[in-house]
Amino acid sequence: MKYFIANWKANKNIGEALAWCSAFKSKYVAKDDVVAVICPPFPFLNDLKKELAGLKNIFIGSQTVSSIEKGSFTGEVTALNLVGLATYSIIGHSERRKNFGEIDEDLAKKTFLAKQYGLEPIYCIRDEKDIVPPDVKLVAYEPVAAIGTGQNESPEKVVEMKKKLNLQDKVFIYGGSVNEENVKSYLATGEIDGFLIGGASLDGERFVKIINQS
Ligand code: PGA
């Protein structure tokens, strides 16, 4: 199975999100061995879920989730809140670590709560020093220098990192300036199970082009 995960980050308004869905739907053709996960900002989760309902192998994910379970925490979005809306949750993206001070302890709590409420974590690490909680199935390796810079890390280096990580039966995902031009070079290694895609996922047709390379 190959995973293509679209991380929209803090982009788009609702109109743009719906236009993305139309563009995506006009081109998407499901394949048995390909899964796509669309991770829009929280306010669009429900609309995307409805818009993309019925498409085979398409799932909705959140870009983060609270480390708190529930209660009087104004503004938080918890795993409980996401039940019925999202299937996956990105946890530990380097932008969360850097800009919002998220540390391993928070990320372990997020992972625990995500699992408890039936969300599958997509756990991001920057390198081999970041600790992956034991029950995580999908690990996304995202070297900071490659994120949003156009400086994607070479497939050889990514495979080297996979070896260092010794992930056993976990799913190994790469993220960092993946696009329709370079995705094939990663697939050709036979070692990379999927991609976390930021900038190049913001256009629905372009995202399908990337998926279609597999
Ligand atoms: P990028 O972002 O594809 O724009 O480099 C990847 C990510 O941050 O998940």
Image: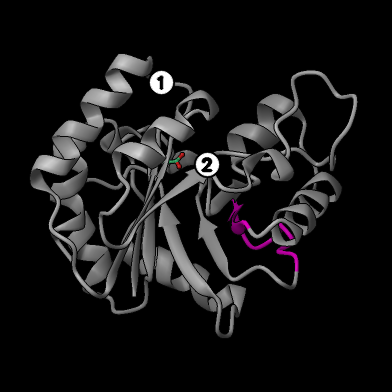
Label 2, on which residue? 144
Magenta part of the protein: which range? 119-133
Q: Is residue 180 visible?
A: no
Amino acid type indicated by mark 1: Asn
The answer to which quarter of the image holds residue 11 is top left
In front of the other: label 2 or label 1? 1
Residue 112: x %, y % from top left: 79, 58
Q: Circle 1 sits in a helix, a strand or a loop, which is it?
A: loop
Q: Is residue 103 visible?
A: yes
Residue 125 in magenta stretch: yes
Badges 2 and 1: C-beta atoms under 8 Å apart?
A: no
Give the quarter of the figure containing the C terminus.
bottom left
Residue 165: x %, y % from top left: 60, 73
Name above or below for residue 79 compared with residue 13: below
Residue 81 in magenta stretch: no
Q: Circle 2 sits in a helix, a strand or a loop, which is it?
A: helix
Q: Is residue 181 left or right of residue 179?
A: left
Q: In the depicted view, which residue is nearer to us: 129 or 174? A: 174
Amino acid type indicated by mark 2: Val
Residue lying at the far left of the rendered structure? 27
The answer to which quarter of the image holds residue 8 is top left
The Cα atoms of the two marked residues, 2 and 1, are separated by 19 Å
Q: Residue at x 28, y 18 (%)?
A: 16
Predominant secondary structure, magenta span: loop
Q: Is mark 2 within 8 Å of ligand 1?
A: no
Name above or below for residue 27 compared with residue 211: above
Label 1, on which residue? 11
